[in-house]
Amino acid sequence: MDERAREEIGEELSIGDYILSGGELAAMVAIEAIVRTRQGVLGDEESLVETFSPGIAGGFEAPLYTRPAVFDGKEVPAVLREGNHARIAAWKRDQEAARTRSLRPDLLKSCGKQEED
């Protein structure tokens, strides 16, 4: 953001730690994040709570899926389509741990998590 604009506005919004070639994509991300907080935009209000997942501290996030439910012959896991938020949260925790254990087991040790045998 241009420093002169930031000084004039007095606040700024970050959409992540990366550089874009223009403000168009950042504006779309901000609009998406704001609009989804409006009542009736999401099918289930609890979906808003489940939107952001910090994952295991310092570890990998669970796999993310969008529509359609089947793409190129590959399906979104059934648990994610059932709408049971407790089961979805448990599935995400399992996936996060499995990914981190597979890709960077050292992160589990550094965040105080023990590897499972």
Image (tube, rainbow, N blue to C red):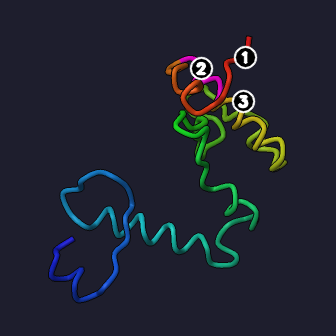
Q: Residues within 10 Å of mark 3 (few under 14, many from 20)?
A: few
Residue most extreme to the bottom: 8
CA separation in Å, label 1 and label 2 = 9 Å
| Residue 96: image location, x then y, percent | 63, 32
Q: What residue range appears in magenta?
A: 97-102
Which quadrant does the N terminus fall into? bottom left
Identify the residue shown where x is 74% and y is 42%.
Answer: 80
Asked whether 25 falls inside the magenta stretch, the response is: no
* CA distance for labels 2 and 3: 10 Å
What residue is disc 1 on? 116
Mark drawn on residue 94: 3
Residue type, numbered disc 2: Arg
Q: Is residue 85 above or below residue 29?
A: above
Is 10 left or right of 59, judged from the image as shown? left
Residue 108 falls in which quadrant of the image?
Answer: top right
Name which of mark 2 and mark 3 comes first in the sequence.
Answer: 3
As rendered, which of 77 and 94 lies closer to the eye?
A: 94
Q: Is 111 located above or below residue 17 in the figure? A: above
Q: Residue at x 34, y 80 (%)?
A: 11
Question: Tags 1 and 2 in contact by the CB under 8 Å rule?
Answer: yes
Q: Quadrant of residue 112?
A: top right
Q: Considering depth in this image, is 23 or 43 the residue closer to the camera?
A: 23
Q: Amino acid at mark 3?
A: Asp
Kindly identify the residue that appears in the image at 33 percent across and 52 percent down: 17
Q: Which residue is mark 2?
A: 101
Quadrant of the image for the C terminus? top right
